[in-house]
Amino acid sequence: MIELETRELEYFIAVADELHFGRAAVQLSIAQPALSKAIRRIETRLGVPLFVRSSRHVELTPAGEALQEHGRHALNAVSAAVRSAQRAGDARAPLRFVLKPGGDAGLLSGILAEYSRQPDARQVDILFSGPTDRTDFLRDGRADVGLLYAPFDDLDGLAHETLYTEDRVVIVPSVHRLAGQDAVRMFDLEGETLPLWKGIPGADNSGPEVADVVQMFHMIAVGRMIAVLPRSLVEQLPPGLICIPVTDAPPSHLVLAWNEQDCRPLVASFAAAALTSSAANRAQSEPTEQTV
């Protein structure tokens, strides 16, 4: 059976992500010739080329694309296994909760309060991620649970429970052609430039790349793009921007997610607390009937 060492996979993934041997070597803190030699050894062992190389260009072959996808999952699985083993041996280890700044729809304080009442509650460490890497935190074991947005985040390999469902709005500058509308439909947005989120592979938007909501707001303000987002992410807009409901956009779901292989009681306890808290929040926000 052909086997690759974890370090060899790390070398390959670095080159596959960067598509540049020099930058990958700097990232890995090794010499570029040593990295090139390691990649050639991997190709020889597998019997297939992984990269097409030229003096100015590096690209993945179909075999390389397959190894990039499955190799990343393998590295994540190894990292998760190591971290799980370490945490299992420490009964006092905190629970690590990942979310992006402002990405809790106002639920975080209620969830933490409800969890603190659990008899087995532990300290909760809050981790803030970038716009697109929370799934990586959960898959490789850097976080135990996290808040994700469906259908935007990839939930493959993750167990999850829906905490909150909301509509979506379009963010436009106040001088935009749609700015005076009370509501719009997806058809009204045809031909508009949408953001390309950094770190999301395969996105078919052709607009400027943005790494976070702050960058997106700046680009919208200068008329370079518009954006469609869950309403809770844009409750406080900078001056000069407005949000308009998109009546036929699919709803957004805020979900609590964790690695589907993680069956530890502390994760189940936190999930139960989050569901209880979100249900109470919905009950409080629903209008009550008044009798005459």
Image: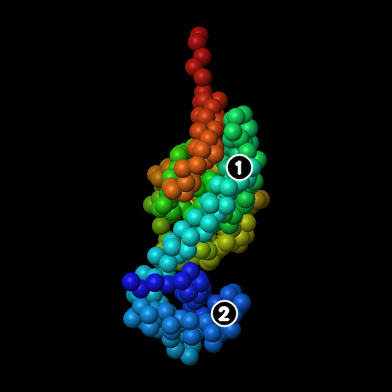
Look at the image and tell me whether residue 273 can be seen.
Answer: yes
Q: Is residue 158 left or right of residue 215?
A: left
Q: Is residue 17 above or below residue 215?
A: below
Along the line of sight, the residue nearer the viewer: 73 or 211: 73
| Residue 2 % position (x, y) | 35, 73
Q: Could you say which disc has been placed on residue 91 in the image?
A: 1
Q: Which residue is mark 2?
A: 25
Residue 254 makes an appearance in the image: no
| Residue in the image at 51% along x and 14% along y | 290
Disc 1 residue crowd, few under 14, some 14–19, many 20+, Cα 10 Å: few
- Amino acid of disc 2: Ala
State which quadrant residue 28 falls in.
bottom right
Which x, y percent locates residue 126?
Answer: 64, 47
Q: Residue at x 46, y 39 (%)?
A: 162
Q: Residue 34 location, x and y as percent? A: 54, 84
Q: Nearer the viewer, mark 1 or mark 2?
A: 1
Q: Amino acid at mark 1?
A: Ala
- Image quadrant for the N terminus? bottom left
* Image quadrant in which you'd find residue 117: top right
Mark 1 and mark 2: span between their CA atoms?
38 Å
Of residues 36 and 90, the one drawn nearer to the viewer in this rendering: 90
Residue at the farthest bottom position: 55
Q: Is residue 239 above or below residue 19?
A: above
Residue at 48% x, 60% y is 78
Question: Which structural element holds mark 1?
Answer: loop
